[in-house]
Amino acid sequence: MKNNILAISKYFAILLLLGGFFSACDESIDLAKLDETPYELSDEVIGYIRNNGGNRKQSFTEFRDKGVEEIYIALNSEAPAEVTVSLKFEPSLLEAYNSTNETEYELFPASAVTVPAQVTIAKGSKLSAKAEVEFETTEILAREGTYVIPVKAEPVSGNIKLSETESNFLIFVKDLSKLPTAEKSTGIKIISCMEVNDTNPLNNLCFTLKGSGKPLIDMVILFSANINYDNSTEKVFVFNNPNVQHLLDNREKYLKPLQDRGIEVVLGILGNHDHSGIANLGTEAARQFAQELKTVCDAYQLDGVFFDDEYSKYLNPPPPGFVTPSSDAAARLCYETKKVMPDKIVAVYVYSRTYSLPAVEGQDSGTFIDYGIHDYGGSFDLATNYPGLPRSGMALYSQEYAQGRITSENNLRRLRNEGYGAHMIFAMDPLRANFEWSQKRSMESIARVLFDDELVYDGKPYSKDW
């Protein structure tokens, strides 16, 4: 990770389509797959489903015992008269999703779901009344996993048309009733980005809070796996160095104990000194890489990915199969990743081409990333960088423990008082020489200011034993 935020430059390629023919491998001009429904100009009044956070097509929520997802019918223009739209639980939608995305999500039991029969939109309005889809735990959900509630909308009355691609909505839900949680009273998440080439991730278990007994750390990022290009297959792939691979291969020893305490484990994805990166994949390449990320997360039972646009040697002009590096391409990868695994975390570093992400297919970037993690010392609100991202997903005042870059208690107090929801520490290691006078004092401040609690260090650090 870099130490300073650099100004971000955008690169624009002007594509000239001559004679109607172009190379199939140039994904930068593959526009056929883009859903332009949200941008079409039409005299028709067109509606679509969205949730309370602005997500279209799908959303993800975790619940304990009982849960509610608020959905609405939104229109592209005011309703000419009162509109009624029916809603129903439709299993065939999940069958189609699994077939298209090569996934195997299971249906949430219909008997444990209540879907309102219909909603209305008043004349002159562009948004329906709230529809609450309610669901509750059942014995069939005893094992861990993500289930899907598929909701289909159909017009009943009123002169409107529902978008063919956005009249269906999939609610991905995960029942946490039987799982531990590291969540503290204030809800603020502490993200520990670990240099696993040097440090055992089990060290995150050494720190708890005296009052609540909860772990100080909520999420561990394994820093880092890489995106690389395979010349033989002509595709990008996930590359793990020996340290990362050892942790994944031995997840029962190094990762499961974290998850058993409610700590989420996320895989960092970083450039690796070749011409591939997270910011130069065309649409189809992004979809393929997102599928591979899902395969990795499923195989090793990881909780998501963290994208950091560094150390790639982007080429200009881009080679076949790649596009000019841009925040648009980075956003596309985040979008495709969230689309194929909505139940997993998608986090980005507020740096380089993930510093700010545009909308994709009408979806604001804050609806398909879960966390924007500031560069060291970064403290500004990220609503402009990632429209739609709530403050709960913004990590401010990141600290770098290897270099002793520590933030103040005043900064932590501002983070809490203004409703920001996350904070990152990088390269924590109890075996480093600066632990007692720097790292530990910083974590004591975090416990005191963010959680009104006292840090407990068990004094039993884990060495790197591989």
Image: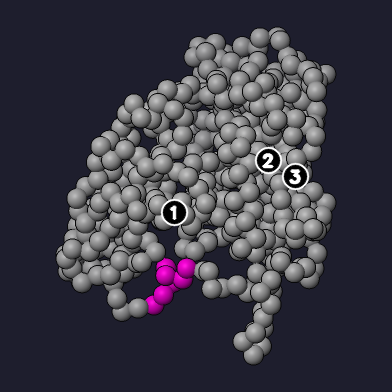
Residue drawn at the location 83% of the way across and 18% of the way down: 433
Q: Position of residue 245 (x, y in %)?
A: 74, 34
Sequence-wise, the earlier of marks 1 and 2 is 1
Per the image, the residue denoted by label 2 is 268
Per the image, the residue denoted by label 3 is 239
Q: Nearer the viewer, mark 1 or mark 3?
A: 1
User: Rounded to the nearest whole Å, what is the CA distance between mark 2 and mark 3?
Assistant: 11 Å
User: Rounded to the nearest whole Å, what is the CA distance between mark 1 and mark 3?
Assistant: 28 Å
Per the image, the residue denoted by label 1 is 97
| Helix, strand or loop for disc 3 | strand
Sequence-wise, the earlier of marks 1 and 3 is 1
Q: Position of residue 313 (x, y in %)?
A: 81, 57
- Report the side of 97 relative to 256 (left or right): left
**Kind of residue sitting beneath label 1:** Tyr
**Kind of residue sitting beneath label 3:** Phe
Position of residue 353 relative to residue 324, above or below, is above
Q: Quadrant of the N terminus?
A: top right
Mark 2, other Cα within 10 Å: few <14 / some 14–19 / many ≥20: many
The magenta-colored residue range is: 35-41
Are discs 1 and 3 less than 8 Å apart at CB?
no
Q: Nearer the viewer, mark 2 or mark 3?
A: 3
Is residue 111 within the magenta segment? no
User: Rounded to the nearest whole Å, what is the CA distance between mark 1 and mark 2?
Assistant: 27 Å
Residue drawn at the location 37% of the way across and 61% of the way down: 166
Q: Position of residue 279 (x, y in %)?
A: 68, 58
Q: Nearer the viewer, residue 168 or 325?
A: 168
Residue drawn at the location 57% of the way across and 36% of the way down: 303
Q: Nearer the viewer, residue 429 or 65?
A: 65
Q: Quadrant of the C terminus?
A: top right
